[in-house]
Image (spheres, rainbow, N blue to C red):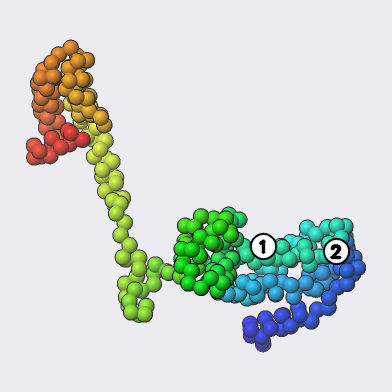
Amino acid sequence: MANAPELRRHFVRQAMEAPFLQREEEHALAIRWKEQRDQQALHRLAGAHMRLVIAIAARFRHYGLSMADLIQEGHIGLLEAAARFEPEREVRFSTYATWWIRAAVQDYVLRNWSIVRGGTSSAQKSLFFNLRRLRARLARETDGIGREAIYRSIAGAVGVPVEDVAQMDARLSLPDASLGAPVGHDGEEGGSARITFLVDGRPLPDEVAEDAIDGERRLIWLRGALDQLDARERRIVQARRLTDEADTLETLGASLGISKERVRQIESRALGKLRQALEARMPVRAPEAQGAELRT
């Protein structure tokens, strides 16, 4: 039984040996497929253009993907072209199919070249497929030009920001790195995986839940303690301690019709009442810690 490489070579050889279609024969096959859905006509039309699929797929083999997969995706594009082709427009099928084949292969490359999807816009797609060619041409035509100048020239030619060119160049220069791969000398076995060196500064889920529960409990305690104050004391505490931008003693004194010293005295007395009310409900803690909670 033939192995996979031999089968691929046989397939390519058959595609290259398929006879070319004359314009009249191609037109007749396209009409039979469009109007009668003649599968034999589609098979002959597609078979005669498989060499076009192979030629286009070969242009993208340097992206590290299987040539067989590239040809398969190009064949899908060829069949899509056959389904949409309008023979009455008097355009050769190869001219029309070229766009669909190239689009199918390019989309496959973008989906499979990296686990991170790139080229989501037409400009980004153009940058992805033209960056290496443009960079090589600029480096060849302009001796001694710096990297930043090359990036600016490419950005102007493709129509993207310079930052996008630099990021795409970095992506094309380095392969994807698995977080499960060991980190060591030449990737030696037994080393720690990359993921073990990634530190998440966010709190753990149990800490988030604990903080949420404690926060709700403290809010209930604080509301109960505020009920122990009269209206003027509550207003001063809220304006001075429970807002993002605290009012000054002068501002509160003017609005209440009292001196700023009197406001300070009322505030001090109200804080004492709150502290006593909270201590009666909260576990025994250091006075400075209770004061810190009250200030927050």
State the quadrant of the N terminus. Answer: bottom right
Residue at (86% x, 73% y) in the render: 21
Residue 98 in picture, x, y percent from top left: 73, 66
261, 195: nearer the viewer: 261
Going from the N terminus, do you reach mark 2 or mark 1 first? 2
- Residue 259, relative to residue 92: is it above or below? above
The residue carrying mark 2 is 30
Residue 183 x %, y %: 34, 73
Residue 161 image point, x, y percent = 51, 55
Q: Quick one: SS at disc 2? A: helix
Q: Residue at x 83, y 76 (%)?
A: 20
Q: Specify the farthest residue to the bottom.
A: 1
Q: Amino acid at mark 1?
A: Ala
Q: Residue furthest top?
A: 257
Estimate how packed mark 1 is, as few (under 14), some (14 to 19) or many (20 or more) residues with alpha carbons within 10 Å: some
User: What residue is rendered at 72% in x and 63% in y?
Assistant: 99
Q: How many marks?
A: 2
In the rendered image, which residue does mark 1 sit on? 103
User: In the picture provided, is 183 more to the left or to the right than 226?
Assistant: right
